[in-house]
Amino acid sequence: MNLLLDTHVLIWWLAKSPRLGKQTVKLLLTGTARPVVSAVSIWEIAIKSSIGRLDMPDPMESWTPRLTKEWGVTALPISFEHAVAVKNLPPHHADPFDRMLIAQSLCENLALVTVDPAFASYGVRMVDAGI
């Protein structure tokens, strides 16, 4: 199974937060699931960190290279197809970062790992990150 991590899930995973459920952590670490991180999540973290809305324990430059090399995360760039798919999404969710994750999930047939219930209205496959 391929799992697209919502931005908050990536942050929780990096911080070893107890808000990330034990089953979800096990799923991400067992090797049976392929964790995928979108460039949009890295972009969102960069923006929110730079304007003081997010305090990350380590500088991005220290952990982003390790995502793929050490943790086995697959990086997902934003393609033209993903950008166009956002246009056709109903306006259930206003956050542009989340809308891109939804479009990528649909285009790439990825299950979204999140606790955001608004994603369900788009018909994407979801994994509850709190479990």
Image (spheres, rainbow, N blue to C red):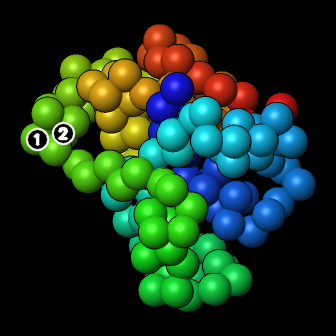
* Marks 2,1: beta carbons within 8 A: yes
Is 48 situated above or below 94?
A: below
The residue positioned farthest toward the front in the image shown: 31
Dot label at residue 59: none
- Residue 91 position (above or below residue 13): above
The answer for how far apart the CA atoms under marks 2 and 1 are is 5 Å
Mark 2: which amino acid?
A: Ala
Q: Which residue is mark 2?
A: 83
Q: Quadrant of the C terminus?
A: top right
Residue 11, how many percent across, how many down? 64, 62
Q: Picture coordinates of residue 26 (x, y %)?
A: 77, 41
Identified at 61% across, 41% down, the residue is 31
* Residue 15 visible in the displayed image: yes
- What amino acid is labelled 1 in the image? Phe
Dot 1, how many residues are within 10 Å of its Cα: few (below 14), some (14-19), or many (20+)?
few
Few, some or many residues within 10 Å of mark 2 (<14, 14–19, 20+): some
**Location of residue 37 with respect to 94 vertically, above or below:** below
User: Which residue is more in the foreground, 83 or 33?
Assistant: 33
Q: Position of residue 43 (x, y in %)?
A: 38, 65
How many numbered tags mark residues here?
A: 2
Can residue 49 be seen here? The reply is no
Q: Is residue 42 left or right of residue 53?
A: left
Front one among 103 and 94: 103
Residue 34 is situated, as x and y percent measured from the top left of the image, at: 51, 40
- Mark 2, secondary structure of its residue: helix
Residue 80: mark: 1
119 or 23: nearer the eye?
Answer: 23
**For the point 55% across and 53% down, which residue is it?**
7
The secondary element bearing badge 1 is classed as: helix
